Image: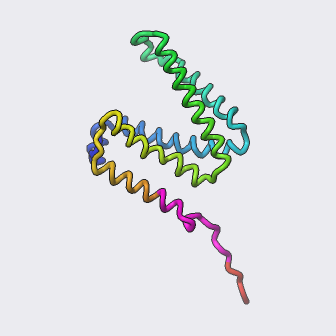
Amino acid sequence: MNGLTMSKLLEFDFYLTLIFAISALGACFHFVSQKILIEKMNATDMNLSIFLWCSLVTTVPVPSQFQLQGEFNAISVLSLTGLGFITGISFLIYAKALKQVSFMVASILGNASIIFTLFWSWLFFKEPITIYIVIGSLLFLVGMFVLALPGARVSKPKQIANVS
């Protein structure tokens, strides 16, 4: 899908594109809700509750696809447990950091992981880095730079005193 025009992308698989768009919207809501809840809840309680709900939702079998596939072994369970632990710790650290920084700084740092993802995919999986990826990354970095400028903060409009 790298470098496809929007019409080709939508023609290729509209539902896959729709799922990506919905997941991006969900990530935005998750980020905003975390920033709001961190002022009202303990970071550990907030993350443990969401991980509990996610674990319950993912263990419920989907009726249309209820069949076990592959082997069940201890390494698989250990890998899933380790991945869950690492993810849980990172969410906990991130939630604690949200208390310390502004919303704008947190959003910039949270979204900077995209650049690392591109680098890791190139380094470990030999994914090609095309001109589209380079331009998109540069636009992303320029946007982060513009948001970090001191004058980029939204201020309240000044009220002009009515002199008569």
Along the horizontal axis of the image, is 86 left or right of 5? right
Q: Spot the residue most to the bottom.
A: 164
134 vs 37: above or below:
below
- Magenta segment, which residues? 144-159
Along the horizontal axis of the image, is 118 left or right of 23? left
Q: Residue 163: say if magenta.
A: no
**Quadrant assignment, res 47:** top right
The x and y percentages for residue 150 are 57, 66
**Could one spot residue 7 in this view of the protein?**
no
The x and y percentages for residue 111 are 49, 47
35 vs 87: above or below:
below
The answer to which of 73 and 59 lies nearer the viewer is 73
The answer to which of 78 and 22 lies nearer the viewer is 78
For the point 62% across and 25% down, which residue is it? 52
The x and y percentages for residue 7 are 28, 46
Along the horizontal axis of the image, is 28 left or right of 1? right
Q: Residue 149: say if magenta.
A: yes
